[in-house]
Image: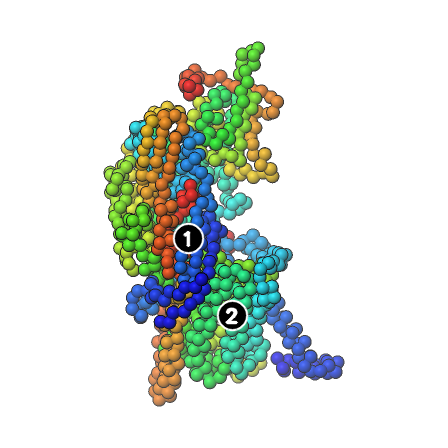
Amino acid sequence: MATTASTDAVPGFRGTYFGRIKNAIISIMEGMSVTLGYLLQRPITIQYPDRTPKPVKDTLPERYRGILELDMKTCTACLACERACPIGCIKIEVVKDKETKKRYITRFDIDIAKCMYCGLCVDPCPGGAIRHTNEFEGSTSDVQYLVRRFVPPGERIEPAKPKKKEKEEAGAEGS
Amino acid sequence: MTEFITEEMTLNMGPQHPSTHGVLRFQLTSDGEVIHSVKPDVGYLHRSIEKIAEKVTYHGFMPYTDRVDYVAAMNSNFAWALTVEKLGGYQVPERAEYLRVIAAELNRISSHLIMLGVMAMDIGAVTPFPYFLRERETINDLLEELCGARLTYNYIRIGGVSSDLPDGFRDRALRFLDHFEPIIDEFNRLITYNEIFVNRLANIVIIPREQAIAWALVGPNLRASGVKWDLRKDEPYSIYPQVEFDIPVGKGEVGTVGDCFDRFIVRVDEMRESSKIIRQCLDKMPEGEIQSKLPRQLKPPKGEVYVRSESARGEMGYYLVSNGGLNPERVKIRTGSFSAMAIMEEVSKGIMIADMVALISSLDVIAPEIDR
Amino acid sequence: MERLADYIVYNLPFLQQIPRVIVDLIIMLFFATCMLLFWVALFAGITSWVERRVAGRIQSRIGPNRVGPQGFLQWIADGLKCFLKEDFVPAAADKKLFLLAPYIVFAGMFAVFVVVPFGDGLIISNLNIGIFYVLAISSLVVVGILMSGWSSNNKWSLLGGMRSAAQIVSYEIPVSLAILPVILLTGSLGMQDIIRAQGPYPWQWFAFHNPFTFIAFFIFFIGALAEGNRTPFDIPEAESELVAGYNTEYSGMRFVFFFFAEWANLYIIAALTVTLFLGGWNTPAHLYTNLFGLLHRSVDVAGTFVFILKSLFLVFVIIWIRWTLPRLRVDQMMDVCWKYFVPFSFANIVGTIIWMVLADAAPVLGYVRYILFVVGLMVPLAIAMKITRNFRLAKSEIHLNPFI
């Protein structure tokens, strides 16, 4: 296949012959003075991780959404966070002991590898048990270590008793 | 001039090409440096976000809207919130509206910073890019204080926002704007009016007014062609009617209206306007609630709605069908980058490979926004 | 060089039994290796570190600062890394040409060092056609680049190679034409003669000799940038358009050779500009060497020092330009060459001839050089003023410490 080469006048030029030389000299000098100015200024690089004045973790704002953390002592096993999570990275299993009629959490896993740090699970938590930390370094040698297990396998933990008002709310959600 | 016959060659630009901004592929047919035809090949970044919407709740889809356009995630959040609120008739407290606009305009600035820096880099000047990333870093810090994340904010909630301004945010934001406005002038001196840069962009790929409208260009790309159309003014939403700002349009300052330079300079001017909006919002912001009382599990009534809003890349529309259940029945996202891809084939005949690079970055396409 | 060979052969009698040609060859190879190891490699390596540090600071970054003190050994680490990499040849490449190309590029660059002066008497070979030799031998680089672009069997590489060939061939013309006024004024092609024809003081340099050489200086410098594929003429390796241009497919040591050549070329551009237009190794002390004959050697050392200092300053300017300016488009690059540089260069030659005739008639024209020197001083002054204004407008703070 062969076509003819385009020989149209190439766009992109303006000004007179000497005007363009003048423009080029002035604008190039302007540009070069800006860059030389920055050469004389302090760089803004933060030398993460080892040469920062204090650890980056401590400089993060209060609201920073880092890796999720769970306080098992205040968790009421209301499952609101599991329901709110859009990807399902939170897995909670609750069993009811037939003899004592008590609920036990047998599994509370948060898969950090799946988590997208959206913060939607933190909002509905009645007791503030699940929350974001300032931790953001999650590198491990194997992806399975990224599943945070808050209930050790084989154990069962009694959930905290919800306060009355929150209990109603939690109940309303289930409907 | 003598016409000479040469063989055409097919060039594969992308999906791993430095100037295609993500995974985007163009099939170029060129005669040496001169391009004869361009075929955009989209879909390398398809993550079926629209399908995911059918499986998650209305609240739960908000983090996914971050990923539609990750450079201007806040605007994308905003559009989704507006859509669901319109369908369900949910009210938003006034303070939340101001917070939304502040966050969205900050994000618009940071998105334009990326675009302008990347465009300068594609033209060959590497230095403006880190300068602009440095400014963007300050915006990221501000937004991080506000909502806890730097890129995928998930700040706007249906019926409000997730958190109020932190202490000292107002001062820090104003200090940033005071610092930032002279930086725009410095940037103009460094690159915008550089003779080489101007010659690379002036009169390159002119999209005239009629063509821009016919091919459904939106946002800054449309305004660069001289069309004064901005949804913030022409179809006002949120509190935009209460703030004063101008809509910069392409004037053909160094070439013809609608060339690559106009698409560049329109965004530079828009950053000034956004900064003006943020200043006004910070002054006018009333006290009050930031989130209206809504049930945890949203069930908007049966029906369908299309809401559009002005994102950093122009009109971002969400078409939503609800069946009255917990999940949307169907969501369709209309994005500016996708329609910009359509015009690519039409306008890129006879340009050079270097102009092609300028065209891609001047249209400010973001690959995830094309494919969703 | 010949004198040195004579001296060695005279002092080592066993060499006299071997044919003189072979002895010359061995001595030359020995000195070439020394040159490569102790100057070119060292310079190219350290320049790569300097460029990255300067670029870093220009961009508000730091640049490499981890390997060795302030990252000074970064270039050795990079070189070692590339040395250990696989020498990869694409399956569809033209293997012989592909393997040969980097050496040709490097040889073309390295051979120029034969006539680059370092001081009074410190030159490998003071050829009487010095500058002509430079123009001739540096054209070899085009062959290598074209070869690499073609043999890679990659369309982007090919485009890069073609761009490069078109660019270097075009810019040879204004560069050679810009050298002609200097040759006219000197009456010699030898590098040392050109330097001796200038004086130690700036207004005695050829750059300020007359308005035509003043323009020729800029044409030569910018044209040399274009020949060395540096920004704003880095079109052959335009990373945002052609990925990496002609060296896209190269890896390991062959890749290093391209960059070796590029950074060595930096010094060549600077050294040639200093030789032709900026007074070379002339120091005020050279005027008085007859008075203090004994101190001749130390004057030489001072001259070398001055020469290298001037060259390094120009290297910095080249780096500074690179990290400021955008890239021209390929047709605009041709435009600049043929519509701006070539006509101006021709005008310069004619102008210089007329000037020489007039200057003989009217010695008062000799004072023009002082005016031109003041004009030349205005450039750094204007930049300094602009920087102060930028600092005032953006409320920036000065921070001169280069060590972070």
Instruction: Name the residue located 45 percent from the left edge and 82 percent from the top edge.
Output: C183
Q: How many marks?
A: 2
Dot 1: what SS? strand
Near mark 1 (Cα within 10 A), the count class, few <14, some 14-19 or many ≥20, is some
Residue type marked 2: Val
Check the image and tell me how it is coloured: rainbow
Q: Residue furthest front?
A: A1
Q: Position of residue C233 (x, y in %)?
A: 44, 65
Instruction: Classify B28 as above or below A144.
Output: below
Image spot of residue C31 (x, y percent): 63, 73
Q: Amino acid at mark 1?
A: Lys
Q: Residue at x 46, y 48 (%)?
A: B23
Mark 2: secondary structure? helix
Which residue lies under the disc numbered 1? B39
Q: Is residue A62 visible?
A: no
- The residue positioned 50% from the left and 67% from the top of the image is C266
Q: Is residue C3 above or below residue A155?
A: below
User: What residue is disc 2 on?
Assistant: C142
